[in-house]
């Protein structure tokens, strides 16, 4: 079985920056250029996988499945979503974001396009971040699983009734609440990388877990009109803030595999979630490939993300027409 290859292209030297750009800086972890960091994480990931004897996601189609509603139409804008309280501004420039987190290997392949022209967006900066198998976000470990939003974990019986469309407030990082400053220096399951000339970017991570109040998901941002340098990415604006979702069949399959099986928090289903808009791929539902009889071998997830590069959608108060500032990244 052939192991999937990680992207290894170097950031482009530069591209034009608007006359009044939003300043945001992506700093590569440690010293050296982004290409060096990417190469190092590639070798580290391979060594770690060999040590743990964790196979990579399968390359063959035999015995795999796709997520329902996965038909992609390039001219449709991918749904915008709230940022959530636990975004850390592009703190790690890398494609392998796993670090020491245990879980089912996940290879996430994205294609970013202009939804109006259907042309791929080259050199866009794509952020992803998500919780670990136990439902904990790096940078906010003190919040635990289900204790986010700045307060204690919810008590008593889960809420009942029809969702109102408002984001849940009982769990970390998923929906409502303003941005919260990090409480620690951990940065696992977070990363930023650039799209290639075909609009493609691929991340290696683990299948996310869950926490009370949200279904299983991954957060994302797409930044354009900035400048790539040896140090990272600077300027530009955020044209898309969204979330990726997983079919229930796949989530149920992971729930019997450790360490997911040890997560005892109540799980919100895809149809119960108040952030996912139930529109399939347009709403961020990923196309999934995995073995029915052994999901622990790994999962491949993919999606075409249609964005409007001329618009700013920072996920704070919904889509908006004007650029807004993003905090500068600080090396961890």
Image: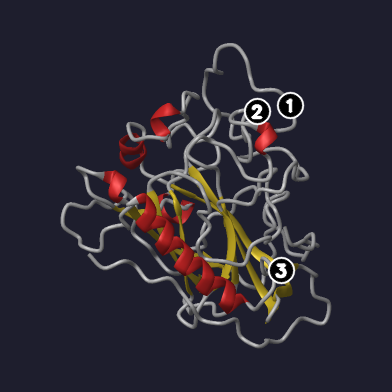
- Residue 100: percent from the left, percent from the top? 52, 49
The reply to whether the C-beta atoms of the residues labelled 1 and 2 are less than 8 Å apart is: yes
Q: Which of 294 and 119 is in front in this view?
A: 294
The residue to which callout 3 is attached is: 27
Helix, strand or loop at mark 2? loop
Mark in front: 1 vs 3: 3
What residue appears at the point 43 percent right and 27 percent down from the top-left corner?
262
- Residue 124: percent from the left, percent from the top? 59, 74
Q: Is residue 105 left or right of residue 170?
A: left
The residue to which callout 1 is attached is: 151
- CA gap between label 1 and label 2 equals 6 Å
Mark in front: 3 vs 2: 3
Which labelled disc corresponds to residue 301? none
Q: Say whether residue 123 is visible.
A: yes
Q: In which quarter of the image is residue 259?
A: top left
- CA gap between label 1 and label 3 equals 31 Å
* Quadrant position of the C terminus in the picture: bottom right
Which labelled disc corresponds to residue 147? 2
Badge 1 or badge 3: first in the primary sequence: 3
Relative height, residue 194 to residue 259 (above, below): below
């Amino acid at each position: 079985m052939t192991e999937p290859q990680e992207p290894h292209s170097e950031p482009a030297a530069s591209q034009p920056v608007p006359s009044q750009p939003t300043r945001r800086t992506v700093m590569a972890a440690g010293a050296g250029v982004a290409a060096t960091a990417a190469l190092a994480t590639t070798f580290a990931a391979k060594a770690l996988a060999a040590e743990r004897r964790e196979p990579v996601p399968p390359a063959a189609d035999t015995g795999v499945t796709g997520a329902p509603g996965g038909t992609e139409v390039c001219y449709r804008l991918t749904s915008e979503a709230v940022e959530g309280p636990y975004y850390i501004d592009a703190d790690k420039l890398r494609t392998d974001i796993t670090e020491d987190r245990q879980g089912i290997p996940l290879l996430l392949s994205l294609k970013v396009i202009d939804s109006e022209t259907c042309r791929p967006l080259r050199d866009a900066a794509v952020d992803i971040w998500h919780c670990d198998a136990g439902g904990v976000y790096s940078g906010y470990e003190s919040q635990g699983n289900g204790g986010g939003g700045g307060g204690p974990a919810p008590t008593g019986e889960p809420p009942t009734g029809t969702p109102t469309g408002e984001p849940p407030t009982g769990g970390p990082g998923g929906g409502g609440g303003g941005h919260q400053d990090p409480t620690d220096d951990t940065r696992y399951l977070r990363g930023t990388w650039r799209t290639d000339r075909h609009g493609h970017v691929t991340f290696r991570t683990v299948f996310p877990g869950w926490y009370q109040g949200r279904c299983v998901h991954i957060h994302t941002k797409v930044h354009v009109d900035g400048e790539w340098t040896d140090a990272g990415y600077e300027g530009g604006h955020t044209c898309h803030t969204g979330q990726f979702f997983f079919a229930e069949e796949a989530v149920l399959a992971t729930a019997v595999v450790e360490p997911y099986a040890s997560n005892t928090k109540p799980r919100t289903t895809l149809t119960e979630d108040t952030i996912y808009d139930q529109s399939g791929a347009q709403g961020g539902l990923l196309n999934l490939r995995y073995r029915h009889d052994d999901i622990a071998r790994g999962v491949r997830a993919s999606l075409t993300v249609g964005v409007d590069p001329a618009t700013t959608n920072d996920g704070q108060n919904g889509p908006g027409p004007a650029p807004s500032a993003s905090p500068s990244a600080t090396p961890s």
